[in-house]
Image (cartoon, rainbow, N blue to C red):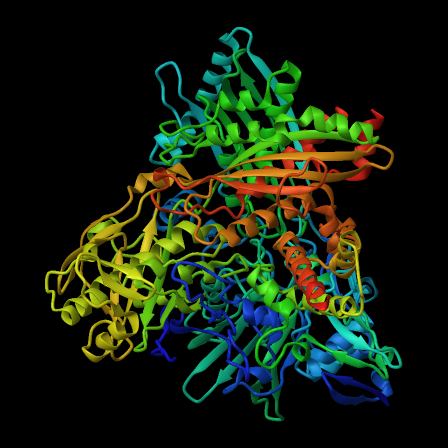
Amino acid sequence: MTFTQMSRRRFLKSASGMVAVSVLGVPALANSRGTGQVGTDGSSIPGIASQRIDGFAKVAGKKVYARDFYARDMGAPWPKTQKYAMYLRALHTDQRFVGLTNLPPAARSARLVYGDMLDRSLLNPNIPIDRDLHMDERIRESLSSGPSDSSFDHPDAVLFDLIVQPGKVPDFLGQAVALLVFDDVASYREAKRAMQFKDADFQVYAAPDGPLPPLRKPFQPETTYVKFNAEGENFSYAAFDDDKRYMAEVEKVRHQIENRLSSMPDLIKHNFTCDMQAMDPMFMEPEAGLAFHHVTSTEKTLHLVLGTQSPDHDVDSILSMFNDSEDAPYKLDAVTLTSCYPGGGFGGRDKSPFSLMLGLASAFSYDEDAEGQKTYVPLRLEYDRFEQFRVGLKRHAATGTGQIALTPDMNLQNIEMTLDFDGGGRKNLSPYVANLAGLCAGGAYTCDMANIYAQAYHSGNISGGSQRGFGGPQAFFAIETALDDVARELDWDPIQLRLANVIREGDTTVVGGPMDQELRLTEMLEIAEAHPLWADRELIKLGFAEEGKVYGTGLAMSLQAYGTSGDGMVAAVHMAADGTLSVESDAVDMGNGSATTLGVVIGDILGANAQSVDMGCYTLFGQTGLQTNSNSTERWADPTWTAKGVGSSSACLTALHQVHVVQQTARALFELSILPAARDLWGLPDLTADDVMWNNGLLVLETTEADPIPLADLAYFIHENGLPTGTLGHAYFQGSWAEADYALPTGTIRLQLDSLATYGTGGSPRQLSRLNTTGPDAHSARYSRTVWAPCVNVVGVTVDTTNGHVQIENVLSVLNAGRVHVPELVSGQSQGGVAMAISYTLLEDMPPGMEGPADGTWNLNRYHVAHAMDVPLNTRFDPLGRAQELIVLPESEGDKKSGRGIAEAVMCSISPAISNALKDAVGVRYTSLPITPHKILKGLSK
Amino acid sequence: MITFSVNGKLKEVSEARADDKLLDYLHDDLNLTGSKLCCGIGVCRACTVEVFKPPSNAASAIISCKTSLGQINGTQITTIEGATPKDGLLPIQEAFLKNFSFQCGYCAPGFVMASKVFLDWLATQTSITEEALDEAIHDAIGDHICRCTGYVRYFEALKATAQAQLEAQQ
């Protein structure tokens, strides 16, 4: 089987000129199947995944992760050997870094690079975009915050160096203070053995000679959601077109809320406070990668090997470092990225600083002859787990305070909440995490009034960033434990309280955006209510009591949004002459199963699953002919315009977003090629898609007895007769899909794509004209999010009151996943979410500052993550055993045949359900995560 | 010299490398990267390989990130590359694959190797109660860390494979 080799080269404009960017799968190695981000083990049953498409390679230990690759594996033009990089990390944020002294002999042969030896662009590059903003957001952010804020990865007053310059005070713990480049692995490992855990022996610091950099300054933008939908007024963030007018009225409306609450008799007000420590994503593969500057007489190319969730951003960032001006000293002509499967991600590889640090080190990986002539050599940067804990992106430590107000008949009137996220040293995605937390503060509920503020602030701690849940874990913990407290204090049924307030279609969120999606929250709560884990909770408690165990049951729900406020995605579908199919997608599969899913969702459309799925192909966007920079007043009327190209990959973007673009693109291939071929072969010129169906890889006429046509015969005909052998589509979603008419030889078809092109002989795509385009209303970007994955969790715990140990006995998750594409992946995501939530709720204990992993000595012997014994392993509820049962709602018409991104949905409400169960068990409210045995005992002692 | 075999091939390294970790040697010297580095301190067990130390006929699962070359003198090491059949997969690999037991897959080789050692041991047992089987499975893979899947599907697959093997043995 061979597919036409597509050119994935894309030209990017940099400050110093055009740069060609290419994305490659990893080199095929001898005797390997399924290497790199190319899964090649597709299922033979259309629409059904019999295994992960990338599964064979992974279970057989093939080279698929960035860490697996050495220069010797890469083939031409890579040389066979590489140098090794090691960064030394800051120990203080209140003292000047002076320099290094007394380096051990093993390190003295290394090239030593201090911050003051770097060119300005290498020292402090302008990170191009901080988040996947679509065009409207980008314009708004730059207008609201001024030019400096849109490109700098830090607060205005804190300029951080990639390597701290001697004489300056480090901005955050773990910031690099020096780079060492070793010639070979032996010297690297010897130096590492000599230096690890001994930083203070050779890093020299002195008292600062001026004021310390400011801390606690919020990263911009901050989030303020004030809503007042009463007394004939309808004030909300979404009700305004711009932030300035909205913010000008916020204070006045806050007073209105206060006044209205004061006027309501018998109002029940409940104050709450909670906090949680930072959390390490602890993806299994510590970050590693290769970089090589290949210099010829005509071109300088940077070759990269990375496992990243954000290949587009990482390449752009590196380009911003090397090509920041016309006379940049290290100016690149091309970048080639070998995009590997990440060994876990959970958000921690989304815009991770690792890529930039690898790119930086690569500039110093060269041999120099007597004349000073440099020959560049590949370089490997490989964090070990200590370094990964020390510098890898964290989920933010956070505090939440506020008040909920309800009427005596259980109606939620107001949610007031302040959420503060410790962003650490870099801005990264922190303010956007806080932003989504602000939306999640409203929980799964409707209320007329809200007063929510969320911020991420700069500190000297390890940087926070995108993490599974993206602000949801903190916000849902706050609202769900607060509601539970109210129910207990007033002896209300926790489910009835929630049923009285669940948000429904037609309601608005705390942002003011409309709830247009069917949620089925009532149905889900009723399922939980009837389940024996909840219905028989008192009997179960008695049973445990007879065994001398203290047991409790807790319930919580979450309504996790998926996607961002606007998402672009691109895909290509190819058909080989023998009928085998392949899919290319800009998405990255972090293990969540995107590749597998995208391979099978074309089965019903094209009669077979993809046998090959190639991920991380973000440069496909360059072939769509679309751009985001045209005169935005024309917007969708401009046939080359889209609101956003592609963005970072998160697990929850697969089920709806990525599946959609692949299916629409596959449908175009059906209409453009398969249907015309069938018309010809059957001699039925008026044949339509409605007349045919697929049956075991055969195209069948529904109404006559014409011989079915095998997909392979159709493919042969298509190739022989010059019909398109592939299609390329781009889609944009912002509450609704952009859609357009495309003129085909056989008529016009309307697709929910904003670009469509065909592949034929020659390999380059040919654009089809886009007509009558309609796109989402620009204003809907102010709704924050528009699609939702609801989950209700019930948790049963036992508590050993002698030592504070908590055991999770049973979990029930009721999940609305919409259309389920691959059931095993959905339940796997749920099981992984349950385990991760149990882990960070009870076990993962990471203090800030040098008491925590910033000191370089932390590993899994101190940072405990859930093992099998911590998790119920059976999948059917048994009152006498431990189990986690998942109930997925059957698909409804309201799902419109779409899946929901559920990767975070189950996880987000496990933590509050555990806290609520503990309250039920021992009568103590635990609102500080992690809830360690020490905290349990401390609570009991009160 | 330190002498041992890896996947059936004899290896000799100088005594000067006695402190080098087996995992580094597999990666750097032999380009066998199927055994994974995760914690590097012997907690997560992603780096598990199989070892025979004559005269014992029984295999053990060892943690290659914590094992030095000096400790494996005279042993026979099998990594995931050596354990995987040239064509196809071991039954336990097939079971993990078909049960969607892993997601990112980085921990999978460690689970495979520990399970292989367990199943080889199970083959020597004439009978075992279900309770003892569950306990033995926990002993075999209960300390392995998987961050993606929550363990459920690994345990399901290994138990099913063990039960099928026991049935076949009878």
Residue at image coords 49%, 60%: A310
Let me know if residue A716 appears in the view: yes
Horizontally, residue B79 falls left or right of residue A502, namely: right
Horizontally, residue A467 falls left or right of residue A255, namely: right
The x, y position of residue A38, in whole percent, is 47, 71
Let me know if residue B46 appears in the view: no
Answer with the quarter of the image where residue A327 lies. bottom left
Residue at image coords 73%, 57%: A96
Answer with the quarter of the image where residue A912 lies. top right
Q: How many marks?
A: 0
Image quadrant in which the N terminus of chain B is located: bottom right
Decide which of B157, A733 is in the foreground and name it. B157
Horizontally, residue B150 falls left or right of residue A729, namely: right
The x, y position of residue A110, in whole percent, is 72, 79
The x, y position of residue A911, in whole percent, is 64, 38
Residue A167, above or below A71: above
The x, y position of residue A759, in whole percent, is 26, 72
Most distant residue in the bottom direction = A370
Decide which of A561, A250 is in the foreground and name it. A561
Answer with the quarter of the image where residue A324 lies. bottom left
Horizontally, residue B24 falls left or right of residue A425, namely: right
Most distant residue in the front direction = B170
Residue B123, above or below A374: above
Image quadrant in which the C terminus of chain B is located: bottom right
Most distant residue in the right direction = B55
